[in-house]
Image (cartoon, rainbow, N blue to C red):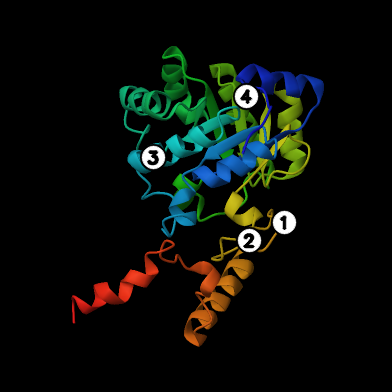
C-alpha cells in the first residue's frame, strides 16, 4: 500500500490551524490499521493507552505499561511513515519525576520514532511539560476527562459543565499553552467551552467528545469501525460494524469446516507433476 502524502510535522498542524483547516486524528495500535489510516490521508495517529481496553481487554488504561506502548508505537510508525504519530504516556510513566518523564518520553522517540508525546493533566503537569520541552520533545497536553485519573473525577464523566469547572479548564488550557506545549487535546467537554478555548489558544486544540468548534477531531479507531463492544461513548459515530462482519465470517467458516465443504480442491496444494504417480510406492514403504 503506497501513498504520495508528504510528511506531516508540528509546523504542518500549526499551519492548518492558522488556515482554518480541520485536523483529522485517529488512534491506531497496529501495523495494518496504521497503513489504512495513512492511505486514507489522515493527519495524525495516536498510539493511545486506550490500547489497554481495545487490544488487551483491561477494564481501564491504568495497567498499560511503557513497554506495551513502545511495541505498538513501533508498528504504527513503520506502517505510517508520513503521518504525525503521537505516543501516549501511560500511567506512572511521567508522574513520579521530571527525570522519569524525560526518560520515558525519550523512549518513544528513540525506540519508536514518534513525533510527539501526550500526557494528561493541566496546571499540575506544567513542570513535566517544561522538562520534556527542554529535552527537545514535542508535547501534546490533555485536559477535561483524563482517564488515568478518572477515579478522582468520580468516573468517566464529562468535565467543564459548570461555571467553576469550565473556569478551571480554561485556566489549565492557558497554563499548558504558556508552558510551551505545541498541541492540546480536550476530552468530553461542552462545545461552548471547547470552542472558546480553541479560539483563545494559538496552538491547535483537538477534540475527542468536545464538539465541532475545535481545530480537529480525534476518535478511537475501535469505536469508529464498530470493533469495541464493551460500551459506546456518547460522542462516538460508528462508520462501519466490523464486529458483526467478522463474527458472521467466522460463523460461515465454522459451518463450512463442520460440513466438510472447506477446504475445497482449489484450496489445496497437489503433488508436482510426475510425483503423484510415485506416491503409492512411497506409502507402501510405511505399511
Q: Secondary structure at mark 2?
A: loop
Q: Which residue is mark 1?
A: 239
Sequence-wise first label, 4 or 2: 4
Q: CA distance from mark 4 to mark 1?
A: 34 Å
Q: Is residue 119 visible?
A: no
The CA span between labels 4 and 3 is: 33 Å
Q: Nearer the viewer, mark 4 or mark 1?
A: 1
Cα gap from disc 4 to disc 2, whole angstroms: 35 Å
Looking at the image, residue 223 lies above or below residue 166:
below
The relative height of residue 216 versus residue 103 in the rendered view (above or below) is below
Contact check, label 2 and label 1, Cβ < 8 Å:
yes
Q: Secondary structure at mark 4?
A: helix
Foreground pick, 189 / 78: 78
Q: Few, some or many C-alpha atoms within 10 Å of disc 2 (few <14, some 14-19, many ≥20)?
A: some
Q: Is residue 108 above or below residue 281?
A: above
First in sequence, mark 4 or 3: give its number. Answer: 3
Q: Nearer the viewer, residue 178 or 282?
A: 282
Task: Classify residue 94 by image quadrant.
Answer: top left
Q: Quadrant of residue 157?
A: bottom right
4 or 3: mark nearer the eye:
3
Amino acid at each position: 500500500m503506497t501513498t504520495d502524502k508528504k510528511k506531516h510535522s508540528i509546523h504542518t498542524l500549526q499551519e492548518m490551524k492558522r488556515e482554518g483547516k480541520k485536523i483529522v486524528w485517529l488512534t491506531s495500535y497496529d501495523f495494518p490499521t496504521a497503513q489504512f489510516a495513512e492511505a486514507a490521508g489522515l493527519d495524525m495517529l495516536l498510539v493511545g493507552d486506550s490500547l489497554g481496553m481495545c487490544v488487551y481487554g483491561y477494564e481501564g488504561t491504568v495497567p498499560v505499561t511503557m513497554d506495551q506502548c513502545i511495541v505498538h508505537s513501533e508498528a504504527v510508525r513503520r506502517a505510517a511513515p508520513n503521518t504525525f504519530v503521537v505516543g501516549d504516556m501511560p500511567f506512572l510513566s511521567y508522574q513520579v519525576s521530571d527525570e522519569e518523564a524525560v526518560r520515558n518520553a525519550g523512549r518513544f522517540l528513540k525506540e519508536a520514532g514518534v513525533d510527539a508525546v501526550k500526557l494528561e493533566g493541566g496546571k499540575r503537569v506544567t513542570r513535566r511539560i517544561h522538562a520534556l520541552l527542554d529535552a527537545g520533545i514535542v508535547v501534546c497536553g490533555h485536559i477535561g476527562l483524563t482517564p488515568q485519573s478518572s477515579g478522582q473525577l468520580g468516573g468517566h464523566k464529562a468535565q467543564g459543565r459548570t461555571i467553576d469547572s469550565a473556569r478551571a479548564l480554561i485556566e489549565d488550557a492557558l497554563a499548558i499553552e504558556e508552558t510551551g506545549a505545541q498541541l492540546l487535546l480536550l476530552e468530553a467537554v461542552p462545545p461552548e467551552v471547547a470552542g472558546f478555548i480553541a479560539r483563545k489558544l494559538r496552538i491547535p486544540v483537538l477534540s475527542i467528545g468536545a464538539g465541532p468548534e475545535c481545530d480537529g477531531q480525534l476518535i478511537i479507531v475501535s469505536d469508529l469501525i464498530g470493533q469495541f463492544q464493551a460500551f459506546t461513548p456518547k460522542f462516538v459515530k460508528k462508520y462501519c460494524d466490523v464486529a458483526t462482519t467478522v463474527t458472521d465470517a467466522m460463523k460461515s467458516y465454522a459451518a463450512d469446516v463442520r460440513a466438510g465443504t472447506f477446504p475445497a480442491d482449489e484450496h489445496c496444494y497437489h503433488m508436482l507433476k510426475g510425483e503423484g504417480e510415485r506416491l503409492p510406492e512411497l506409502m507402501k514403504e510405511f505399511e
